[in-house]
Amino acid sequence: MCGILGVVARNPVNQLLYDGLQVLQHRGQDAAGIATLEGNTFHLHKGNGLAHDVFRTRNMRALAGNAGIAHVRYPTAGSAVDHNEAQPFYVNSPFGIVLGHNGNLTNTAQLQKELFLDDLRHVNTNSDSEVLLNVLAHELQRECKQFRLDPGTIFAAVSTVHKRCRGAYSVVSMIAGYGLLAFRDQCGIRPLVIGSNETEQGIEYLVASESVALDTLGFRFMRDIAPGEAVFIDFDGKLYSKQCAEAPALNPCIFEYVYLARPDSMIDGISVYETRLNMGEYLADKLAREWGQHDIDVVIPIPDSSRPSALQLANRLGIPFREGFVKNRYIGRTFIMPGQAQRKKSVRQKLNAISVEFKGKNVLLVDDSIVRGTTSREIVQMARDAGARKVYFASAAPPVKFPNVYGIDMPSRHDLIATGRTDAEICSEIGADRLIYQDLEDLKAAVLKANPAIERFDCSCFDGVYITGDITPEYLDRVEAARGQSKAAQLPEDDDQMELDLAMSATSM
């Protein structure tokens, strides 16, 4: 999971792209980068860390131009990545191209061989985004005549990219001398939206991972970019679009609605906030069915993603809703912290319990999901330390039992607390008195309630069904073996240091 932006404007875009990265910072805290185009010259700055740490005044001044792309990176394998793998990436043959990518290619190894042996192109990093960039550059070279591009040629190249690349990818790229190119994989797993802004000088266009970026930057939401579709905007402000995939089908990642996206975003016609309210209703109904005469005194959300679900659950059951944790907003999201030691350490820095809301009460803690269980275990203990008599735990999502290979940090079955455990065993592991999970069918219904037109979701982390059709047990074994080897080779002797667990083909999402 990453955040991407691409803009063609009438005025300098450096501040606009920086502001957009701040809005999308929740999608990635590992690295940030901006590339702008001035004439035929790219200006690029990127590095590890949050956007406000990567960019200084001198960097912003150097990012001249009225068009550009930007990226915030999420450490999908829990890696402490080399700054060279921050995005955007750049190639200069056959054209100057910069590219940023959200997702994960599942056939990276095959593409790397093809690029080296057949396409005669060199890749410098382990990033699948650099592989994707070189595949695109090669296909543009094959399609163009006399080294000139037009929208038809560009769309033909994207069509071949779709045929060669497997997995999830939403892409923004800039081609020097031509314009902004954005496209989405034919399964529509990762989100991508486009908006416009009318100015006195002419129309401007912005492509982004989430609609919230359009809202805050003053652009009017136009639509979601369709699965398999490519959009090209030239520097005169003309927009071209074409369906470039042979069999596109919308399969949005359902975990976007559970946790990843901001609640004020619309993704594929679905309000993220509305879905989270619906999740709370369905979970309340299940609790009422299965727990009967419960003794819950208060419902307390674990900030921030679970708040709408917890509020709606409390309202539906007629139980008081209280804020029991204060969140330090200057600590990163623990789900995307690289390594269990760092993740565990950050929980107490991130949250502090309000003891008056816990003392002598039976509390129901509501979280959006339980992935590794590290955070849940710490929070349950915090509730007990604050004086709770009993601590119950509810997850607005089903048990996460399977690796995610499409750009979320769930690469190993061994890291997932629900893999191979019953609900009772998980409850014991996190130290709760009782545990309840959302049912998968109820989760789907909660999202479909906001947009009944969606026919299918990517629910692979819950049901193990990989919609790209190319994920085998052997593939998962190879990914996990590579992850284990990397951890053994790089794990510091000091256990208090951050783990450096680097997974094969998952360094760029």
Image (cartoon, rainbow, N blue to C red):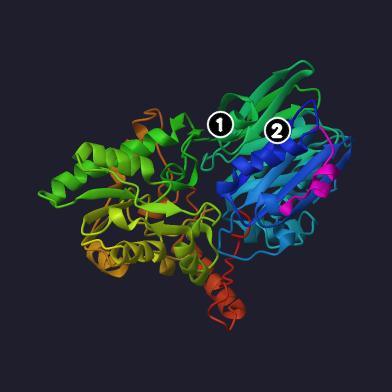
Residue 201 circle label: none
Q: Amino acid at mark 2?
A: Phe
Q: Residue at x 10, y 49 (%)?
A: 293
- Would you identify the image quadrant in which residue 245 lies? top right
| 59 in the magenta segment | yes
Residue 220 as seen in the image, left or right of residue 93:
left
Q: CA distance from mark 1 to mark 2?
A: 14 Å
In this orientation, which residue lies closer to the viewer: 119 or 123? 123
Q: Is residue 409 above or below residue 340?
A: above
Range covered by the magenta-colored residues: 54-66
Dot 2, crowdedness within 10 Å: few (<14), some or many (≥20)? many
* Outermost residue, bottom side: 493
Say whether residue 90 is visible.
yes
Dot 1, crowdedness within 10 Å: few (<14), some or many (≥20)? many
Residue position for label 1:
226
- Would you identify the image quadrant in which residue 197 lies? top right
Q: Is residue 155 above or below residue 125?
A: above
Comparing labels 1 and 2, the label whose residue is closer to the camera:
1
* Outermost residue, front side: 356
Q: Position of residue 248 (x, y in %)?
A: 53, 35
Q: Residue at x 56, y 73 (%)?
A: 499
Q: Specify which label sits upstream in the sequence, 1 or 2.
A: 2
Q: Position of residue 43 (x, y in %)?
A: 84, 45
Say whether residue 156 is visible.
no
Residue at disc 1, secondary structure: loop
Residue position for label 2:
155
